[in-house]
């Protein structure tokens, strides 16, 4: 269960005002930062966002004790680019990675040495940094290795595709392999040269092991400021497993007797396991006496992929993972920080994951990198007045309508397909205030607005050198 009897009164102690109406934590305070990045969790999968079938009491309580955002976005609708946007603070028009692309012998496109990342920024001001879970931005020893990108410690999966399997034969601790007792069956899929897998003998469950290591990291660094990036694989599916075992978990728990399919039971159990882990995390912070000096943020890397009509993971939005409709990019976002964040606040301010880097800079009294496209939203986290973003921007390369862009400015959202081919371009325009399901394309009725927004998109997009690269 989550911690009890927390003092959640709003406080301005330790805050100093900066020019432009921004806030920053004073240099004498170095709050711990815990960022939890779920995997393929939909907007509607949590009780505090309307879910009724899946139980998430700890995260729901987190929302009651902190601030819950209803207009938070991730900067890409799939794994690797979303993590690249997060780590570098860049939107997809400038980011090194803009689609999922695999490289031999395993792993994804590495972010280059030249990129400046969140952990590198925080290390400059005295933080110990740890990444636990799924990395997706490089392989052991290459330039994208998390330990070459600012992390003092890494434990989990380098490759997002190998991370499909929750019962793998190995995990990685830094650049060393950790042998597990599971036995695997290699599976070849048509878009990856190296074999993926599922387990024929299931003993060691990776989601347990990785979380335990993350908790150890907190314990070992309780006396100094730390940044914990918990990039859990929950509740991503293992697409290579047997048809009714794709949501891999040792026990269905409270869903065992439900009149549901095994897939639905597995998915619900995985989300509830993640919720249980959040409860353990909060209790650990309380036991160590560091909860008042720790900010915890919870979100997911992209929209839900689960198609269950019981859970309706992306409701009330159109689309899902891999689309630039709201269902692919709008995510839960909850922030919790006793004595700093007031309780039970709900904010509809639009913001996006590339804002997190400058926000962490403000929290840690670090200098905001000039390379970041984001802005600090620390005032909003503290329920203070904040200037609205000029626009939010997306760019994504995938599918038969490839590539695509989107922009949100105020309540207006424009999606443009095949934007690199003038003869094929087509656009969709929606007013999210009265059409959150994006069902009424009014681009033809608003040609001047379409022109205005497309000009902004043209300025934001730089050439993408990895377009079409899948190996």
Image (spheres, helix red, strand yellow):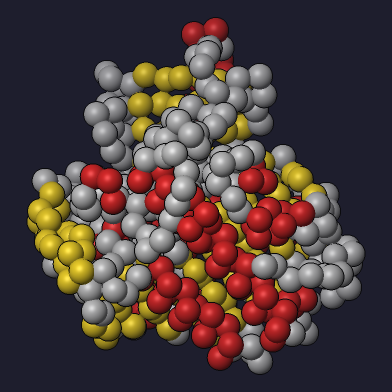
Q: Nearer the viewer, residue 163 or 415?
A: 163
- On the picture, is 388 further left or further right than 438? right
Q: Residue at 72% of width from left, 57% of height from top? A: 61
Q: Residue at 37% of width from left, 40% of height from top? A: 261
| Residue at the front extreme, as displayed | 257
Q: Nearer the viewer, residue 429 or 449?
A: 429
Q: Residue at 26% of width from left, 69% of height from top? A: 202
302 shown above or below 86: above
Please indicate, yes or no, whether residue 212 appears anywhere in the rendered image. Answer: yes
Please indicate, yes or no, whether residue 79 appears anywhere in the rendered image. Answer: no
382 shown above or below 408: below
Q: Quarter holding the N terminus?
A: bottom right
Q: Quarter holding the C terminus?
A: bottom left
Q: Quadrant of residue 5?
A: bottom right
- On the picture, is 41 further left or further right than 362? left
| Residue 389 place in picture, x, y as percent | 66, 43
| Residue 183 place in picture, x, y as percent | 17, 71
- On the picture, is 431 further left or further right than 116? right
115 shown above or below 79: below
């Amino acid at each position: 269960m989550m911690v009890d009897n927390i003092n959640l009164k709003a406080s301005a102690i330790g805050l100093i005002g900066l020019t432009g109406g921004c806030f920053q934590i004073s240099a004498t305070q170095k709050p711990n930062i815990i960022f939890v990045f779920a995997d393929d969790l939909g907007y509607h999968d949590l009780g505090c966002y309307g879910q009724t079938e899946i139980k998430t009491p700890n995260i729901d309580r987190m929302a009651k004790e902190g601030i819950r955002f209803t207009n938070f976005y991730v900067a890409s609708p799939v794994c690797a680019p979303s993590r690249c946007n997060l780590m570098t603070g860049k939107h997809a028009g400038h980011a090194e990675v803009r689609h999922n692309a695999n490289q031999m012998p395993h792993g994804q496109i590495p972010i280059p040495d030249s990129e400046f990342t969140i952990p590198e920024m925080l290390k400059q001001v005295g933080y110990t940094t740890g990444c636990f879970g799924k990395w997706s931005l490089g392989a052991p020893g290459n330039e994208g290795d998390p330990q070459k990108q600012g992390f003092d410690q890494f434990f989990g999966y380098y490759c997002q595709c190998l991370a499909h399997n929750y019962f793998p034969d190995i995990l990685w601790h830094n650049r060393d392999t950790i042998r597990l007792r599971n036995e695997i069956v290699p599976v070849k899929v048509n878009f990856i040269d190296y074999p993926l897998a599922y387990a024929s003998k299931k003993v060691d469950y990776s989601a347990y092991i990785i979380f335990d290591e993350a908790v150890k990291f907190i314990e070992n660094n309780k006396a100094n400021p730390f940044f914990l990036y918990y990039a859990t694989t929950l509740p991503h599916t293992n697409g290579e497993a047997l048809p009714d075992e794709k949501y891999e978990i040792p026990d269905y728990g409270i869903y065992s007797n439900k009149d549901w399919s095994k897939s639905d039971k597995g998915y619900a159990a995985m989300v509830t396991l993640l919720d249980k882990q959040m409860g353990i995390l909060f209790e650990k912070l309380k036991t160590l006496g560091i909860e008042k000096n720790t900010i915890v943020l919870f979100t997911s890397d992209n929209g839900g992929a689960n198609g269950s009509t019981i859970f309706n993971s992306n409701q009330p939005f159109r689309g899902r993972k891999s689309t630039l409709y709201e269902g692919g990019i709008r995510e839960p976002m909850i922030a919790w920080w006793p004595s700093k964040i007031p309780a039970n606040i709900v904010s509809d301010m639009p913001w996006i994951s590339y804002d997190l880097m400058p926000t962490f800079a403000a929290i840690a009294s670090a200098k905001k990198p000039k390379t970041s496209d984001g802005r600090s939203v620390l005032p909003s986290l503290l329920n203070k007045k904040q200037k609205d973003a000029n626009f939010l921007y997306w760019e994504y390369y995938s599918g038969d309508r490839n590539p695509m862009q989107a922009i949100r400015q105020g309540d207006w959202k424009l999606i443009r397909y095949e934007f690199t081919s003038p003869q094929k371009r087509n656009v969709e325009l929606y007013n999210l205030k009265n059409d959150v399901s994006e069902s009424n394309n009014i681009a033809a009725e608003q040609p001047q607005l379409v022109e205005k927004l497309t000009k902004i998109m043209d300025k934001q997009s730089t050439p993408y050198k990895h377009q079409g690269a899948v190996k």
